Amino acid sequence: MENENIGYPTFGECMKRVRAIDDTLHIMGGKWKAVLLAHLCYKPMRYSELLKDLNGIAGKVLSRELKDLEMNGLVIREVSDTQPLTVTYRLSQYGKSLKELMDGLADWGLQHRERLFSASKLEQPVSVEREA
Amino acid sequence: MENENIGYPTFGECMKRVRAIDDTLHIMGGKWKAVLLAHLCYKPMRYSELLKDLNGIAGKVLSRELKDLEMNGLVIREVSDTQPLTVTYRLSQYGKSLKELMDGLADWGLQHRERLFSASKLEQPVSVEREA
DNA sequence: CTGGATCCCGAATGATACTG
DNA sequence: CAGTATCATTCGGGATCCAG
């Protein structure tokens, strides 16, 4: 085959997009961010609830992850000065803009798992493809 | 406001999707996978080329990343038994199915950077939002 | 040239104790 | 309850050397 380039005009443009991908991954990737965002997609939650529900996360880590998300405008921190005080975290409007992306990731993942499963059932190599 | 759930029917369903997201992220996330895939999107490349172009990657790491991608059917390894032998890595058809996802990540990242930039120009907090 | 084996280090994480 | 501070540990990544 001659050229397999998939629609990147220049190499520079390509690398610019790679940096953007890394940006996004730093914001919503990592070990906990996705689970955290998903939980908050479901409903607003308190610090202690999250600590309990995110199986195995350490308090220190949870704090930092939440702070990151807050700084990026994805999550809103609300303090009620009850006694003792309670803090609620909720997804911001902007945070909800991530949902489409996360849905894309989830769908691909489900599809991939399905694909692996079919492949193992057939006891055949997954890719019988010859390019071009 | 009453309910902010963004379209997850049950909590279990939500968590199932979280696992799928993690799957996907393990496959195309991390420090090098995206850059690697982007490079191969651009054109097939040799091991040594990649080693040179992926600024700072260690040989051991490159091997492992490529092996991962290969095992997941995203990349095809082609050996030419020249002397000395050369190995070419190319994106598989299946690997190309990731492009849409990566484009989504890239677009969000670019948009986010733009947003941060506008915000700093205005010297205003990014989120002046009040939910619901 | 391709890439595996080994050693080493820093960063991230977990556990625990402590403060407001 | 909501977090922070500290310490111990683990893990991924880099450098180097070696083999097919």
Image: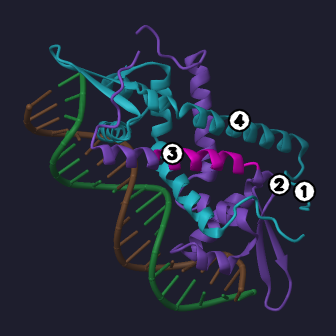
Chain colours: A purple, B cyan, C green, D brown
How far is mark 1 from mark 2, CA to CA? 8 Å
Instruction: Classify residue C17 as left or right of residue B77.
Output: right
In this rendering, do the residues under marks 4 and 1 share a single chain? yes
Q: Secondary structure at mark 3?
A: helix
Q: Secondary structure at mark 4?
A: helix
Q: Amino acid at mark 4?
A: Leu
> Which one is earlier in the sequence, the residue at label 4 or at label 1?
4
Query: Can you say whether A126 is above or below A67 in the image?
Result: above
Query: At which x and y percent is residue A99?
Result: 70, 51
Q: Secondary structure at mark 2?
A: helix
The residue where tag 3 is placed is A111
Give whichever of A112, A18 is nearer the camera: A112
The residue where tag 4 is placed is B110
Residue A25 drawn in magenta: no
The magenta region covers A97-112
Q: Amino acid at mark 3?
A: Gln
Q: Chain of mark 4?
A: B
Instruction: Classify residue A26 as left or right of residue B116.
Output: left
Query: At which x and y percent is residue A58?
Result: 54, 75
In front: label 2 or label 4: 2
Query: Can you say whether B50 is above or below A82 in the image?
Result: above
Tell me whether circle 4 and circle 1 mark residues in contact (CB < 8 Å).
no
Residue under the image location 77 percent in, 74 percent down: A88
How far is mark 2 from mark 4, CA to CA? 18 Å
Q: Secondary structure at mark 1?
A: loop
In this rendering, do the residues under marks 2 and 3 share a single chain? yes
In front: label 3 or label 1: 3
The residue where tag 2 is placed is A93
